Amino acid sequence: MSDTHAQTVAFVRDTQLPPSPPPASEVGLVGWLRANLFNGVWGTLLTLVSLYAIYAILAGVLPWIFNGVWTTKSLAECREVLDGVRGGCFSVLTERINQLLYGFKYPAAEYWRPNLALLLLFAAILPVLMYTLPRKLLIITALYPFVAYWLIWGGTIATPILVLVGFVIGYLVFQRLSTSSFAAGFFGAIIAAVVIWTAGGWLIPDGANANAWLRPVPSRDLGGFMLNMMLGVTCVSLSVPLGIVLALGRQSDMPIIKWICVVFIEFVRGVPLITLLFVASVMLAYFFPPDSNVDLFLRVVIMITMFSAAYIAEVIRGGLAALPRGQYEAADSLGLDYPQAMRLIILPQALKISIPGIVNVAVGLFKDTTLVSVISMFDLVGMIRGPILAAQEWNGVYWELLGFAAVLFFVVCYGISQYSQWLERQLATEHR
């Protein structure tokens, strides 16, 4: 001890103490609960009220689901089986599932055709949804509408082939004329396609559908959730390119093109969709040649596409307006013409900005397809309100049928929403 004195004893530690573990109340499940559910008086109160509300809902719904009956033939038999016990009568779903999915007129022997069209739909949309896949697969996407039409409607295959040839000729004309003028290419493509369709229509004999390999099914026999899917997919697919054209036309320097687009967008946005559906059902046929018999499904597709395209055009116009002027000047400095500048520089950025708005319109459009029931088209909701609830066996079953419809629509709309969020994360390259 004689060597220990003030000059040799260190009064500051020269080694680091091992870190102490955090308090047990700040980590793990307890820490998460305190941080998220019980972080104060008001937080605790709101958590308790929310838990009670969830408990009250589940206490009423879960016994109703688990005690449900699935094998009876009518509501009266369901009530006899339940014998006063709380439970749902889900037998209506097993008994009428084909009508809910395909309508009550679509031939049962032909159900494989819409099923195959649905499977092919997933293969067709993958190259569009997954931009990392080879671009050559877009040929499958381009051919799918014509294959799906032939599968679902049947009849002669010459009709979808003729429509395909019209689009191909129109595209070739657009490529040829758009190098000198975008407007000349656009309107030239429309004129060329109409000429091909008109001339080709004369070549198809009148009785071609009677001897076709696939049995023809008229549009009035389509129904159920299949009709909602067909309207949603078709109208969204058509309204996005039409909305892009309208948005570009509204920003055009040519006054006539600009005002045509402005009047179209403002007029269609100012009219309720249900009014346009009544126009499609009653008045739109007067705008076609006197001898033409335009299908009701096609008329509804035209009106819904016009309605959603007007909204999508405004969404894309917002994306175009958000781009700085320097992007347009950069395209000019590279010597790009108008179609090249739009395709390579302007539209990719504008569409990326517009993704949330476009998805919002698409989800709303898919839900609005249920409005076709007001013009006597038996979609999923129309089937529930009409033939099923009108039947004596199932009159009074509401929650089971409407809950089934809600689940189907939720699955589709939630899938669209999740895909858009994934796509936004993939395209957010400026923050990496």
Image (cartoon, rainbow, N blue to C red):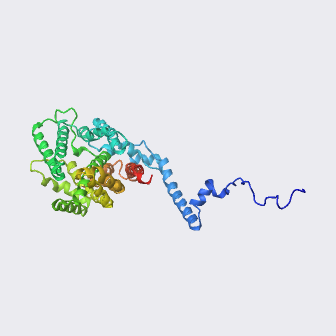
For residue 344, side relative to residue 203 (left or right): right
Q: Can residue 157 be seen in this view?
A: yes
For residue 66, side relative to residue 417 (left or right): right
Q: Could you tell me residue 417's position as x and y percent?
A: 39, 52
Q: Is residue 367 visible?
A: no
Quadrant in which residue 170 is drawn: top left
Total tally of numbered discs in the picture: 0
Q: In this view, does 409 lie above or below 46?
A: above
Q: Could you tell me residue 192's position as x and y percent?
A: 13, 45
Q: Could you tell me residue 114's position as x and y percent?
A: 30, 39
Q: Which of 66 and 18 is in front in this view?
A: 18
Which residue is at the far bottom? Answer: 41
Which residue is at the far front? Answer: 7
Which residue is at the far right? Answer: 2
Which residue is at a point 14% across and 43% down the rendered structure image?
A: 197
Q: Nearer the viewer, residue 134 or 53?
A: 134
Q: Nearer the viewer, residue 158 or 83?
A: 158
Q: Could you tell me residue 15's position as x and y percent?
A: 73, 54
Q: Is residue 363 above or below residue 116?
A: below
